[in-house]
Image (cartoon, helix red, strand yellow):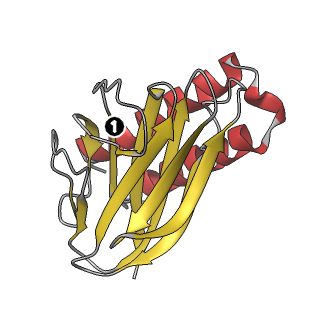
Amino acid sequence: MRIRPSALLVVFVLFVGVGFAQAQGAGNGSGLAQRVAALEAALSTLQSGGSAPPMWSGTTTFIDFNFGSIPYRLDVEEFNTAAEYLSVPLFDQSGSITVLKSGYYRISFAFQAFQVATAQLLRNGTIVDSGIWTGTNSFIRPHLARIVRLEAGDIVVLKYSGSSQPINSRLQIEFLGQ
């Protein structure tokens, strides 16, 4: 059986996430259980000869001290097995992500900040979900997680608003199917 390197990377990232969750004491919450289930499902898929789901994962190192509602500007791509599903330009001021293939997507965003902060997920300019950080150290649990139907040509933007930069942030978009 031959396993694609990109599939191994997805499994590795899931594995690291489980280890980080355990190290942070998240063993009591459902976040760890979900990560373990995702890891088991990915391993099962790979062992049966399948491939990992198409996913884009990245973050930002951009710092802007003009705090307000600003687009989350991606400049680090951790991995991308979804190039035929999404166009994610790095260093784009607008933070726009273009959907290339219609279907259902799981969009997850987690972050830490020093004070109350919010994140909003917009599809074609309309808010479809939002999340809030209220002062606990809970990076493990996505502050915004949504399964949404997206059509080819849709523009997805994540906006962040707070009195400090988001730190330890991560955006992941996974194609689930049509």
Q: Amino acid at mark 1?
A: Leu
Tell me: residue 150, above or below residue 20: below
Q: Residue at x 80, y 38 (%)?
A: 29
Q: Quadrant of residue 9?
A: top left
Under tag 1, what secondary structure?
Answer: helix
Q: Quadrant of residue 118?
A: top right
Tell me: residue 15, above or below residue 157: above
Q: Residue at x 70, y 42 (%)?
A: 31
Q: Is residue 98 left or right of residue 45?
A: left
Q: Is residue 15 left or right of residue 156?
A: right
Q: Quadrant of residue 66?
A: top left
Residue sitting nearer the eye, 102 or 14 = 102
Residue 113, can we see it? Answer: yes
Residue sitting nearer the eye, 7 or 122 = 122
Q: Which residue is mark 1?
A: 9
Q: Position of residue 147 (x, y in %)?
A: 53, 68
Q: Position of residue 136 (x, y in %)?
A: 73, 26
